[in-house]
Amino acid sequence: MPRQSQPDLTQLRKPASDTSERGLCVVTPKDVAEVVRSARARTLGRQVDAAARLGVSSTMLSGLERGTGGSQLNLTLAVLADLGFDVVLVPRDPARSLQSHGREADR
């Protein structure tokens, strides 16, 4: 099997300089669950309404919020950790958030 060339990682978005201050490191699906549940409740309200707004099923969102978001999430976090990466969730600029766009669309 021929060896593939190195991927060009220069096109990836670089984190903001204050990432370590604003970010939350997630290691397990339970970590992701806490972040998703908190953000959803704060910005989009009820789970059923948020699921429709996000374009996912309420079953999927519920599973994600319980930390049972599926084996793919679990495997992805494990692979990234094994490769030496931290996964850090950093809130975007509020002007770019889903909630902000929704408010503008409702006007």
Image (cartoon, rainbow, N blue to C red):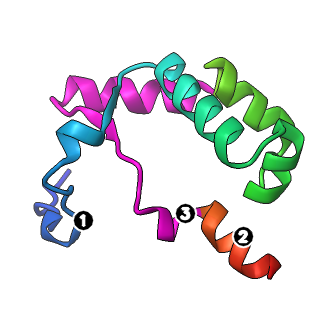
Q: Is residue 59 left or right of residue 79?
A: right
Residue under the image location 34 percent in, 31 percent down = 24
Numbered tag placed on residue 102 in the rendering = 2
User: Disc 1 or disc 2, which is closer to the eye?
Assistant: 2
Q: Residue 56 location in percent, x, y?
A: 78, 50
Disc 1 target residue: 13
Residue 88 versus residue 26 in the image, above or below: below
Q: Is residue 74 positioned above or below 100 on the image? A: above
Q: Which amino acid does label 1 sit on?
A: Arg
Residue at mark 3: 97
Q: Residues within 10 Å of mark 2 (few under 14, many from 20)?
A: few
Under circle 2, the secondary element is helix
Give me the residue at 82% from left, 37% from top. Answer: 47
Please state the horizontal and vertical placement of residue 76, each as a whole percent of the image: 41, 33
Label 3 packing within 10 angstroms: few (<14), some (14-19), many (20+): few
Tag nearer the camera, 3 or 1: 3
Image position, residue 21 (x, y; %): 21, 38
Check disc 1 and report its element: helix, strand or loop.
loop
Q: Does the magenta stretch include residue 71?
A: yes
The residue segment tinted magenta is: 70-97
Q: How far apart are marks 3 and 1 (CA)?
A: 17 Å
First in residue order: circle 1 vs circle 2: 1
Which amino acid lies under the numbered mark 3 shown in the image of this protein? Ser
Q: Distance between the residues labelled 1 and 2?
A: 25 Å
Residue 40 place in picture, x, y as percent: 67, 40
Q: Please name the amino acid that badge 2 sits on.
A: Gly
- Is 77 magenta? The answer is yes
Q: Which residue corresponds to the image point at 49% horizontal and 24% vertical from the top-left?
A: 74
Could you classify mark 1 by the number of other residues whose Cα lies within 10 Å: few (under 14), some (14-19), or many (20 or more)? few
